[in-house]
Amino acid sequence: MGDNCKATPKEPIAGKRNILITSALPYVNNVPHLGNIIGCVLSADVFARYCRIRGYNAIYMCGTDEYGTATETKALEENCTPKEVCDKYHAIHKEVYKWFDISFDEFGRTSTPQQTEVCQAIFKKLWENNWLSENTMQQPYCDTCKKFLADRLVEGNCPTQGCNYDSARGDQCEKCGKLLNPTELLEPRCKVCCNTPCIRDTDHLFLELPLLKDKLEAYINNISVSGGWSQNAIYTTHAWLREGLKSRCITRDLKWGVPVPHEKYKEKVFYVWFDAPIGYVSITSCYTTEWEKWWKNPDNVELYQFMGKDNVPFHTVIFPSTLLGTGERWTLMKTISVTEYLNYEAGKFSKSKGIGVFGNDVKDTNIPVEVWRYYLLTNRPEVSDTLFTWADLQAKLNSELLSNLGNFINRVLSFIAKDPASGYGSIIPDAEGVESHSLTQALGEKVGSCVQQYIEAMEKVKLKQGLKDAMSISGEGNRYLQESQFWKLYKEDKPSCSIVMRTACGLVYLLACLLEPFMPSFSREVLKQLNLPPETQLSLSDKGGEIENSKRPWDILPAGHKIGTPAPLFKELKDEEVAFYREKFAGSQADRADRALKAETEAKQMAEQLNKAKISDGNKKKERATKSSETKSKAPSSVEGEISISRLDIRVGLITKAQKHPDADSLYVEEIDVGEALPRTVVSGLVKYIPLEEMQNRKVCVLCNLKPASMRGIKSQAMVLAASNSDHTKVELVEPPKDAAIGERLTFPGFDGEPDSVLNPKKKVWETLQVGFHTNKELVACYKDVPFTTSVGICKVASISDGSIR
């Protein structure tokens, strides 16, 4: 996933640092929100990428946590099987993390035969070593559903004094975080039927944590210091120890889970928090058959684990106790990095309530992935809760990425790319005399110090500080350019200007390297603009000398190297866009779905009204009918009955860039995002009608399945739809609703069907259908009397009524 490609599985290498990285397995009953992403997978990805550029032998394991009550509950809600729920949401998670550039070595799942094998093997060792006990416990039983209710199938009032949350689950209160047993809930109710359950006896297996206390405390006291555990992890762990360890039930009365390999308990499964951490091991066993070289090799492998604060005790108490109880030499966690909560605007991110921005939402914002990664990581809640706000995202993008980082790189590369009369013709100059250039020597010392601070922070998993240290180099670079006044030096002291430019180029490469763990897509683009191969392996290894070279940035890139084409790396986020996103993502996902449904209903009502309405302007209707009959008379009769508007692939597109055609004064060349991996190049004859500035960053309707055609030397891959008045003196773009999703295919109520992949020009499908395209008196774009429709409303033009569209 991400840009990582799993080829030959890695094994630990003697003499190297072998680092095993995991992030808390995201539960598979919902779409991850931004709080989930920064809390585990993104933070671990940054550290994994850092380890790789440092030359460490590192692997990153993760996957979806699929067993347990939450999955069964979701299956009930969606009227499907637990496996179908897992398949659905595993695919969603995988797609979200792919978009976020997460570089797993393996992204697996816990509902596998390997999970059953490893989990049952650990259980048998615990049983043999007498660390398990049998006990009878009281558990809610629903007479209506005829079954024992696992913890998450019971809800009620939290018993914690001062909390009183009325929707606490049987395992944990989401409001105060207190771990609970179902029988502790006040006014309990069955989540399935809402009836009050009764209490019955049922036999279960328990892990005897009190008996393992000495082994566990010896491990914690040693490794929490030497491993540099985060303070929140230490605090939570010691709070558990102070309260006194209790026997923990490891079985549940469920069907969906790893079966217990014991005759008496064969109808039960393991409790999800017994089997879920074992998922790290089983997922590694899916990655390589030599998994024990990673997981049973404590002398040569370091285990780093990333998670949110609510997962801490399961990783610092229960999971290590489980492994210690087997008596085998497991690789136990060395370092744990824990985040607090990322809150959303005025409230808390919540999967269960659908509040916040979710992983599948971010693609629709048209804000690039590197911006999302940067913002989440600068706002990483390392020691206390932090707050996501759209205004803060805007400020960090516009001031830190655009004005600082992007400005520095663009200034340097654009100046070098100028023709030799005013620049360097894209060739990095030599830096003769740099040893005596005091300003540059001082810069080298500052940069070397920043890099050292960066390394120290990243080694301690202080990711936010590491990012700050890397960005400080961009600030130093901007100050260096200003103090050097390179634009004057070019005219007055060209050798000094060459020193400045070659040094600044080295800083550009160094920034790409330091920031690769945080913004890999940014680094790939910088390499492209430096004209370095995409397979270039960025490195900060001690052996390669890159750390020492950072003090001599003028030596990083060779003189005579030809750079690529400079281009802006970031785009300003405007106030109106911020206001739009804040409104779009207000409320819960259910609220948003209601708004979308309302818009769809309004569109259908509009279509019905238009179908019923009598068009008073008979002349125009007669004119359209005449044109239609003329066109149809030219079309082959065998095709006439087959032509339907559903054959057109019209999508919502976003013009990301527009410029004049280099060889045609009347044409624009646009780059349009239509929801595909790459934008499409489109040539439009709109120069006489629409100013260039009005073509930038606006949503349009794009016909995407015309056969590509060359227009004055540039191949146009689609067509932007526009309306014109009768004498063609005025032209306006057909515009979808502001919150229509990029790439969404427009529909025409009453006309169902799939579009042609490419329209056959000989069949005249577009020409035949186009005569029915027009705007009505309400400025709605229509095919005949049916509006151009998106899931959030209909498409319109600004002012042209009764116009033709093409």
Image (tube, rainbow, N blue to C red):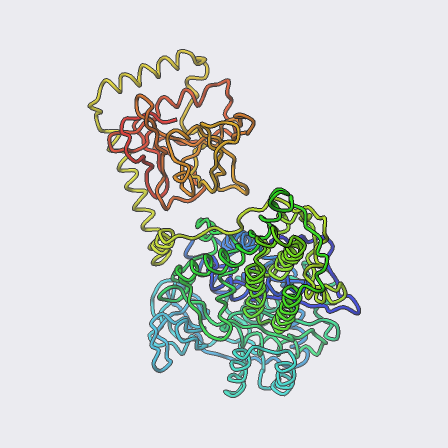
| Residue 736 versus residue 403 in the image, above or below | above
Q: Quadrant of residue 97?
A: bottom right
Q: Position of residue 77 (x, y in %)?
A: 41, 56
Residue at 36% x, 27% y: name it: 805
Q: Position of residue 438 (x, y in %)?
A: 65, 66
| Residue 587 versus residue 739 in the image, above or below | below
Q: Position of residue 676 (x, y in %)?
A: 52, 41
| Residue 789 versus residue 663 in the image, above or below | below
- The quadrant the C terminus occupies is top left
Residue at 49% x, 75% y: name it: 383
| Residue in front for this viewpoint, 556 or 217 | 556
| Residue in front for this viewpoint, 416 or 240 | 416
Q: Quadrant of residue 6?
A: bottom right
Residue 202 in sight from this viewpoint: yes
Q: Position of residue 437 (x, y in %)?
A: 67, 63
Residue at 64% x, 73% y: name it: 456
| Residue in front for this viewpoint, 415 or 43 | 415
